[in-house]
Image (cartoon, helix red, strand yellow):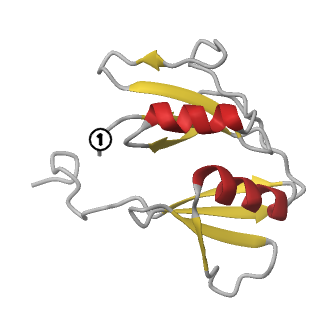
């Protein structure tokens, strides 16, 4: 058996995504208030780094930095929900702009595999896809 022919021979799983943010407090508030993520200890890394956890234990690490990476919709974080409609209503109640992949405001698009999706941006301009995929 070669690694190229094996299916994930090391049982790799997603651990976390790290995002460089301008103001970690503002971004932390967004991820807590909009996505309801639970903040977890950051391993003693200091106040400029905050960690959050999704329901499947995958983490999002926010790192305060002066660097400003380029943002585009093709490079995005993707989350799934069992109730995309209710999430869209919640975003509308908070006056948070969301759009579909082509950029049409307040609506979804459907991928070729039948999954509906929307996109929104966090305070630093990172694109976040939210879809109704059942993982």
Q: Which residue is at the far left?
A: 1
Residue 108 image point, x, y percent = 51, 19
Image position, residue 58 (x, y; %): 45, 62
Image coordinates of residue 116 in percent, x first then y, are: 41, 24
Q: Say above or below: 117 vs 28.
A: above
Which quadrant would residue 101 be assigned to in this image?
top right
Which of the 4 image quadrants contains residue 80? top left
Q: Position of residue 32 (x, y in %)?
A: 66, 60
Q: Residue at x 62, y 82 (%)?
A: 41
Q: Is residue 20 left or right of residue 92?
A: right
- Circle 1 packing at 10 Å, graded few (<14), some (14-19), many (20+), is few
Q: Which is more toward the observer, 63 or 130?
A: 130
Give the position of the N terminus as an image quadrant: bottom left
Asked if residue 132 is positioned above or below residue 107 in the image, the reply reads below
SS of the residue under disc 1: loop
Does 29 appear above or below 131? below
The residue that appears at 75% across and 64% down in the rendered structure is: 63
Residue 123 visible at all: yes
**Which of these two is toward me, 66 or 116?**
116
2 lies above or below 134: below
- Of all residues, the one furthest to the right in this rendering is 66
Q: Residue at x 69, y 29 (%)?
A: 72
Q: Which residue is mark 1?
A: 134
1 or 36, nearer to the observer: 36
Q: Residue at x 48, y 61 (%)?
A: 54
Task: Report the side of 87 relative to 112 (left or right).
Answer: right
| Number of marks in the rendered image | 1
Task: Report whether residue 75 is seen.
Answer: no
């Amino acid at each position: 058996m070669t690694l190229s022919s094996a299916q994930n021979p090391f049982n790799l799983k997603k651990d976390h995504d790290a995002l460089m943010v301008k103001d970690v407090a503002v971004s932390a508030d967004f991820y807590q208030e909009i996505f309801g993520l639970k903040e977890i200890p950051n391993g003693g890394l200091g106040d400029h780094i905050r960690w959050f956890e999704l329901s499947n234990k995958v983490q999002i690490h926010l790192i305060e930095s002066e660097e400003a990476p380029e943002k585009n919709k093709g490079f995005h974080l993707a989350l799934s929900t069992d109730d995309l409609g209710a999430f869209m209503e919640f975003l509308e109640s908070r006056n948070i702009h969301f759009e579909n992949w082509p950029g049409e405001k307040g609506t979804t698009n459907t991928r070729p595999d039948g999954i509906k999706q929307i996109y929104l941006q966090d305070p630093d301009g990172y694109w976040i896809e939210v879809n109704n995929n059942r993982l």
